[in-house]
Image: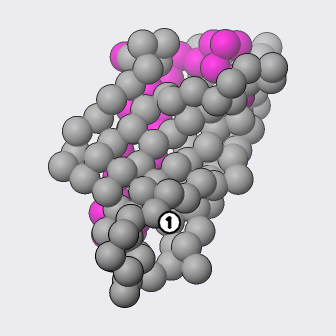
Amino acid sequence: QVQLVESGGGLVQPGGSLRLSCEASGRISRIDYMGWYRQAPGKERELVANIISDGTTNYADSVKGRFTISRDNAKNTFLLEMKNLNPEDTAVYYCNAVLRVVGYISAKDYWGKGTLVTVSS
């Protein structure tokens, strides 16, 4: 069974930094896509950043220059480095991956349960 588990959330002051981690576990043969999304209270879930299998990255305009997404292929782990955080970054951050399981041809979509990031003084 595949699981995505996020970690690294917490309370940080404006201007501070956090690093989120997402570990994918299970009989994974390949990860085609991985994204970080967030959902603030009363708002829809939105894409923060994503990375595809060739290493191409994409960022929401609101986080460009402040957030960096990366992956450790050997560990099936994805990171989101967040700098210069502001209160508008407060949200639950979710890890999403489209991946292939050993023995199956089709890729499937998986989500983690989320980790809360609160930016407040």
Instruction: Name the residue tied to disc 1.
Output: 24
Q: Position of residue 117 (x, y in %)?
A: 70, 32
Residue 116 quadrant = top right
Q: 52 or 10: nearer the eye? A: 52
Which residue is farthest bottom? 103
Per the image, label 1 sits on a secondary structure element best described as strand
Q: 104 or 78: nearer the eye? A: 104
Q: 81 or 63: nearer the eye? A: 63
From the image, which quarter does the N terminus lie in? Answer: bottom right
Q: Position of residue 57 (x, y in %)?
A: 29, 35
Asked whether, in this view, residue 60 is left or right of residue 71, the answer is right
Which residue is pictured at 38% across the width and 65% down the height? 107
Magenta highlight on residue 113: no
Which residue is pictured at 59% across the width and 18% down the height? 85
Asked whether, in this view, residue 59 is left or right of residue 3, the answer is left
Q: Does the rendering let one see residue 66?
A: no
Check the image and report above or below for 26 versus 43: below
Check the image and report above or below for 12 versus 26: above
Q: Which residues are magenta?
A: 65-91
